[in-house]
Image: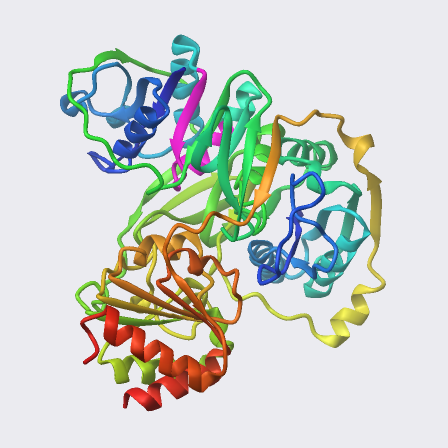
Amino acid sequence: MKILVCIKQVPDMESHFRPNGSATWFDESDLAFRMNEYDEYAVEEAVRLKEQLGGAPEITVLSIGPDRVIEAIKKALAIGCDCAVHIKEPDVASKEPWQIASMIAAYARSKQFDLVFTGMQSQDRGSAQVGVLVAELLGIPSTTTLVGFAWADGVVTATRELEGGVKSKVRLKTPALVTCQLGLNSPRYPTLPNIMKARKKEITTLQAGELSSEKPLTGSAAFRHPEKRGSGVVLEGSVDELVEKVLVILKDKTAVLR
Amino acid sequence: MKLLLVGEYREGRLLDTTAELLGFAAAISGDASLFLVGSAEAVPAFSGTLYLADAKVYGEYNPEVHKQLLLKAVQEENPDLVVFVHSSYGWDLAPRVAASLKLAQVSEVIGFAGNAYEVGCCNAKMHRNVTPLTSKAVITIQAGAFPALQVEGTPSVKVLSTDAASTTEFMGYEPAEARDVNLAKAEIVVSAGRGIGKKENIELIRSLAKAFGGELGASRPVVDAGWIDHGHQVGSTGQTVTPKLYVACGISGSIQHLAGMKKSGFILAINKDKDAPIGEVADVLVVADLLQFVPALTAKLS
């Protein structure tokens, strides 16, 4: 059995974001990057399946971007992926979902993966498109937003999160692709021995341009802080001052404090 | 502009969000038709063309089958824009249709100007404009972004069918878990978010809730981490609350969370990140370390 896990490296969401020169996306300088949170669940689920099957499946982890993404790749290897593919694309921010999916599909097409795991979306772009597009380009069934996953005898049984706490259960035959929702499992932290072991695992580098030359289907502009909708006030200062100010406001503006 | 709206139908019932598609169509002054895998016995009020496939035959959501049905409607209608709600149905089906037709897709649209669509990014902290570079496009609209619109009329129904093979077998639904905490009726809700840092700090928030005489809520990451049970979760996959006072402690304010609490009477947010999207809906945003601020506020209230 061969498994592919697709991961993205994204900035820490608590960062202060500034537009880049053309305001198409954020300025990367001063940002700390980490693995996309949804993808942590994808990596964990793949590793759990490998463990369930006595270590037999081979897990390849794939990431697209400049050299900084190797850090996210190494984390996935330390968690339990076996080998890695780094699709080198220095200007990954200018690549939109169709182009990203085309690169992944071009790589995966001849590799006969039985299962592909992705996060349901990225924290920064949030399009929730890439996973499904990859499956469509590969011509394999897919399902999204998993909060439950089981595999037996070539069949995936998946629990999808719908709205209002309702879930649905679906079954699909492999080869298949699934996208993972937060809460699917409890992602583990890599241990020091596993981080050391991961250093010996192979990372293959491919050039993005050699995989796909698809043109973008969308353009991006006006990356900005949202216009403030409310008339909210922002309070800063010492804790004691803040507490006093908040109590005055609550007494004045709400009927709940007297 | 010709729009094909993709309505949602589940277990014999048209979902309310379908009215938001009509709201979007009105906002953009589009000429709308509607696609639905639903029932001929209960067609929605609508005055355009309804492309209807029978849910009894084509079932609850089935990606490959619904895609083929929708592609037939697209072929016949030739719309400029295929519009979905950004829901478990829409975000699953939209990219399949976009891929089949090689069309641009813009996800989770909250506004538009000309042919540029405004969307959130970076966990809703930032916005940007996305423009399709294909002449026709697929979009999903954020639930709640466009006001629901009730329309009148009787649609002219065109029945769709397909013999497409199913690749995904629908097994059934699991109902939402029973809740032992009723936040919907609380006058004051004090919620804990990821910013509390660790499980033990839930007690700080619980004490504040108690001092206010309110109920304890939580955001999704806190529930996912197992720090508190799902009954406390506020948001689109938890409970929707409208208390007189909502206190958000260390909650950044994802779209899903905001959907569950933004109609509260007064929103007090405590966050160390001044740019956190919770600031968009908060009446007061206190920029502070909540581990210091919350106990101090609790002490003053008690």
Would residue A18 appear left or right of B217 to someone viewing this image?
right
Residue at left 47%, top 43%? A144
In the image: residue B180, left or right of residue B4:
left
In which image quadrant can residue A137 be found?
top right
Residue A181 position in % (x across, y down): 48, 53
Check the image and name the residue furthest to the top.
B76
Which is nearer the eye, B74 or B207? B207
Q: Is residue B293 visible?
A: yes
Task: Indicate the position of residue A51 as horizontal and vertical percent values.
Answer: 62, 62
Q: Quadrant of residue B158?
A: top left
Image quarter of the N terminus of chain B: top left
- Report the front residue among A34 and A57: A34
Q: Is residue B180 above or below residue B207?
A: above
State yes or no: residue B120 in magenta: no
Residue at 57% x, 33% y: name it: A133
Q: Nearer the viewer, residue B257 or B98?
A: B257
In the rendered image, residue B237, in percent from the top left (x then y), is placed at 34, 55
Quarter that holds the C terminus of chain B: bottom left
- x%, y% of residue B224? 44, 65
Which residues fall within the magenta stretch?
Answer: B80-96
Q: How many marks?
A: 0
